[in-house]
Image (spheres, helix red, strand yellow):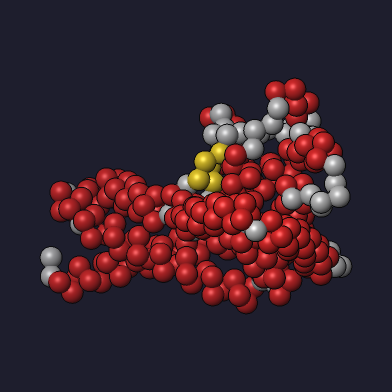
Amino acid sequence: MAIEAVVTEAVAHAGVGVAVSLVDFLSAQFTNPAKSRIHQKTRYLQAIDLILDAESPPQSAISKDSAECKNSVEYAEQVSVVREYLRRSGLVKLQVPFFQRFKDGVRNVLAHEKINTLANLPKLGIAAVIEIVYDVFFEFQMRGAAGIAASLYQIPALFAGMWVGTWLNKIINLFMSSSDERKIEKTLKKLMQDTAIVDIVMQYEPPEALKAELSSQGIDMYVSQLTRTGKGAYKHLRHIAETAKDAAGAAQKAAGAVADDVVHFSQNQQEKTEQERTDRRKRFDDLTKGH
């Protein structure tokens, strides 16, 4: 095959990849109107805010009350909501039964993006499946083994088109989404990065005494784990946590030498926690005003 024909065919398959990505994006946008998306993202924001408040109660709060809050149905429900946000963002996968996974897949096949949220390796796998299936049923009948061999450049071309389409969707989304929706999404991502919310919801396990009540209310607390994308996105957080742990150890040693500094440190930490809570509440009120 002439090099010109190879290039032309590769560009055509890349164009198909872009089209697949756009269809994935647009189908999710049109089946989820802006008002519905804002309402759902506001729900995610509210759940994160409530969980963080429960994890860092005011100094005046009774620790027993805080523990009861985290062992309540309401707290478990908020964790479930945040896990759903992480799942839809492609950062977390839930270990759900096959039948439930099948039902969710059928229900959400058009309602949510399925390809654009995948990491590069799974996306490359999908490109390979599409090309191989197409070649087996169409190319092989017309071109024989040469059609199968063409997959060696068609698969990377289709994958490249999907990758370009994903970034193109981000640009389109800037024009399709409202400023309110972009602000809420930006706040959600900032909370993911600047707080321990991911670790909190990933590690949460409801008490045995609570599981029956959760099940009766239709709240399923499936085991969750980070996807490849999630691991990459939050790898730096583990380094930050280790650094913070070392700093805390150093502060503890210093506390034994200078008791007065410890008092001021504790006061500053308390003030910082209170300020963060106030800022979150104000940001939440501003973003949800009128929704």
What's the residue at 45%, 67% (across, down)?
165
The extreme front residue here reads 257
Question: On screen, 222 above or below 174?
Answer: above
- Give how far across and how far down residue 164 sits, in percent: 41, 69
Q: Is residue 64 left or right of residue 2?
A: right
Compare residues 96 and 112 and report the one nearer the observer.
96
Residue appearing at x 60%, y 39% in the figure: 203
Count of numbered circles on the image: 0
- Which of the pair 23/89 is nearer the observer? 89
Which residue extends farthest left? 1
Is residue 113 visible to the viewer in this orientation of the structure? Answer: no
Q: Residue at x 67, y 48 (%)?
A: 82
> Would residue 239 appear left or right of 69 to someone viewing this image?
left
Q: Is residue 144 left or right of residue 103?
A: left
Residue 46 visible, this angle: yes
Q: Identify whether 8 is placed above or below 188.
A: below
